[in-house]
Amino acid sequence: MSFLEKWSDNLSKYFEKGKPLHPFRALFRAADSFFLTPETTTRTGSHIRDSVDMKRIMITVMIALVPALLFGLWNIGYQHFTSMGESVTIWQSFWYGFLKWLPLVIVVYISGLTVEIIFAQHRGHDVAEGFFVTGLILPMILPPDIPLWIVAVATIFATLFGIEVFGGTGYNFLNPALLARAFIFFAYPTTISGNSVWIAEAGDAVTGATPLGILSSQAAEPLPSMLDMFIGTIPGSIGETSKIAILIGALILLVTQVASWRIMLSTIAGGYITAALLNATGVVAGTPVPAYQHLLMGGFLFGAVFMATDPVTAAHTQLGKYIYGALVGIIAMLIRIAGKGYVEGIMLSILLMNIFAPLIDYCVVRANIQKRKNRARKI
Amino acid sequence: MREKNIHHISKGYDILLKGAAEQVIGLHKSSQYHISPSDFRWLKPELLVEVGDTVKVGTPLFADSNNEKIVIVSPANGKITDIVRGEKRSIQSIEIAGDGSENETETTIPAEFGRNEVIDILLGNGLWPAVRQRPFSIIANPDDTPKALFISCFDTAPLAPDISFILKDKKEEFKKGVEILKMLAPVTLCMRPNADNVIFESIAGTDKHYFSGPHPAGNIGTQIHKTNPINKSETVWFVNPQDVVTIGRVFLHGRLSFEKTIALTGPCAQNPQYYTMTYGTDISQLTGSFSSINDKNLRIISGNILTGKQLSENMSVRFYDSQITVIGEGGKREFIGWLLPGLKKWSFSHTFLAFLSKKRKYDFDTTMHGEKRNFVMTDIYEKVFPFDILPMELLKACLIKDVELMEDLGIYEVDDEDFALCEVVCPSKTECQKIIREGLFTVKNS
């Protein structure tokens, strides 16, 4: 028995029911199982279990997010210094971005986990790991200079009304990170939309518009080159800009089989086909942007890879996942291209389909039931 | 082999556990026998013997209180030494001290017999419990007319015994057994394609189906679902191959004997091999040869690691099992185990680097590897569940005890063992088998 195990054993006594530290049981259990894997063995059913647990699943998603995150941190600095007309080293850019991001992520984790731990303690549950991914994703879909108090309010709102009131991770039907973003989007729109928020402390020389911003305002400013959009050296939310980093993350998710390839594939296919059709039918005024270029702009790819694939809020059935993904892609592009009110559509499209996912599942389940009934009738 | 009778099971998984039984058959004897009513699902025993009674092979020990014609008989000659009771005076086991004589008895079979006589002979000799029914995997009701009777001639569970090897010298008994069972219902034999099927191919007048692919291709539930799925108010009977031999022996030689061949397997079994023993024989002496890896405690399981039962005291192999698996108890805590690369960690998912070496065999132990969570990974069950049934939806229907929904979603086609792989791979550590078993219980009593 290691030193840590003995320590944990001794401490656990104080958190038992009726002991002074019992109100902090959930916090202790979370910390304990963070450092040491649980000692439980199988009691019913199969005598062996897979080494995988929710912690492993969630850490895998977090690892998949790392390339986009690292690039995003550098890009915050790069965009800032470029707008000032300064030229600095990679490390200076990265450090600048890191210092912008750190307060955001700390605020998100502290506010969200506080809610989570209070509920876990109150309900006698363990702290679910889902929030660790939410907490990492949320800063990545925000602009770098957003006020911290708004982030805290949005996180608490999303954790409380997106997850906990329904019973915790697994019972929620809206993607919590997107719910927090949507909360900011509608409650404090000036902090998260327009052309001036996407570069941290921007210099006066540039507008700082994202490619989609340029597109929607039909400004004279040229779009960034395809290569810039692919690599990600453009203004935007922290995690969304680098398509190559997102694709590395997608590869990790697909190889480890943590995210559903069905959703990723159908979302991207749905988005591409819709953009191509809209271009072909001439709904868009002026010279349309090619469909493949639409996939490289805005948060579409980030949403398709990391957010539409949330297994809880997506459709649960296999057939349902195809339908859900395709509709996410279609509606995202409809909002973006044909809609007049919003610059980007992926956030609203995923949230809308989160709401429809249970209906899609219901139809798939009914079809399965009907098949069984038809079989019985034939005899 | 007709094309349409070949079924490929693609959704499933073979767990590569160390310790397969060598193809050697030893003899295991003990003067102690333990007969446990819990071997028979949901059976309420009505005791027919008392401590001190002398019993012979075939003497009824207890009856099913719902149908007193169904009796479980003594597999040995000897004396009842104890009746062990547990909570609420439920009978845990009936202890028999053998007298050392050969565990068999003569039975007389009439020269001519029809379906009703066969049923009576099986009931009278205590062989009827070998015939079980789906749905519910309970002992069949002799008054039913099932639409088919299935015999799975292979087992795909981890380290499962090789049934062709076990039946090698019992060809005639098996054949006779199938002939007798044919009088009860149309028989379907399920085999592996391209395997040693000599014994089974020669049996005329049966449906033959072939299943390739990983576990659960050998499960009776998979086989019924793919060939003759059960609708509401239908039943299918099924019998284990070794029990077919026991039935055949009675009708062929007029000898009643509950001897069968058991595979001793698992990473902690020192000399994994086959043993011939009578049903109920105490196996605690066999455990002398078990060796622990890294000084772990041992878990001795009657059956396989997916569906078996842990044996603690009064150790004997369950009525329907042909396998003993010995693995180490787990429970070792690991520092930030969820973060390490996991070069030697088995997982169906690809979240540990060990997935790169696909052929590696593992010393599994009983560690849970995580805490219970809500359903999160919504598509993982489908990957190991070859039924045209929505597994998570069915589990949820069972949890809310919605009988109509369970029926609609196909509860009659499944049994807890069909969900064993779902349970193993679940990252939320959901107790799928327990949920399904309780769901079946709810449906049965509604």
Image: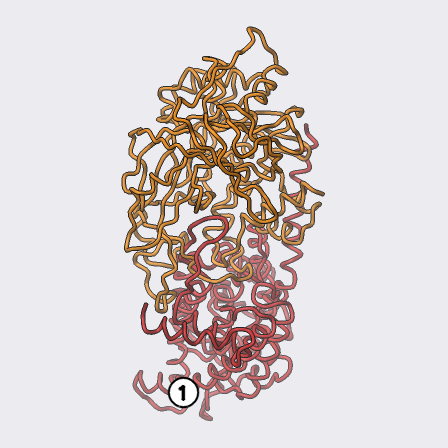
Chain colours: A red, B orange
User: Which residue is situated farthest in the top direction here?
Assistant: B111
Q: Is residue B111 visible?
A: yes
Residue ID at (52%, 11%): B108
Secondary structure under tag 1 reads: helix
Q: Which residue is mark 1?
A: A99
Q: Quadrant of the C terminus of chain B?
A: top right
Q: Dot 1: within a 10 Å radius of its alpha carbon, few (fewer than 14), some, or many (20 or more) residues?
A: few
Q: Quadrant of residue A286?
A: bottom right
Residue A344 versus residue A290: which sits nearer the camera?
Answer: A344
Count of numbered badges drawn on the protein? 1
Q: Is residue A285 visible?
A: no
Q: Is residue A263 above or below residue B440?
A: below
- Where does residue A337 sit, x and y in percent of width and height? 59, 68
Q: Is residue A328 above or below residue A344?
A: above
Residue A216 versus residue A58: which sits nearer the camera?
Answer: A58
Q: Quadrant of residue B409?
A: top right
Name the amino acid, label 1: Leu
Would residue B446 appear left or right of A279 to someone viewing this image?
Answer: right
Q: Chain of mark 1?
A: A
Q: Is residue B278 above or below residue A358?
A: above
Residue A140 versus residue B445: which sits nearer the camera?
Answer: B445
User: Which residue is situated farthest in the bottom direction here?
Assistant: A204
- Where does residue A76 sit, x and y in percent of width and height? 42, 83
Q: Is residue A284 above or below residue A358?
A: below
- Where does residue A17 sit, x and y in percent of width and height? 55, 73
Q: Quadrant of the N terminus of chain B?
A: top left
- Where does residue A368 sit, x and y in percent of width and height? 63, 44
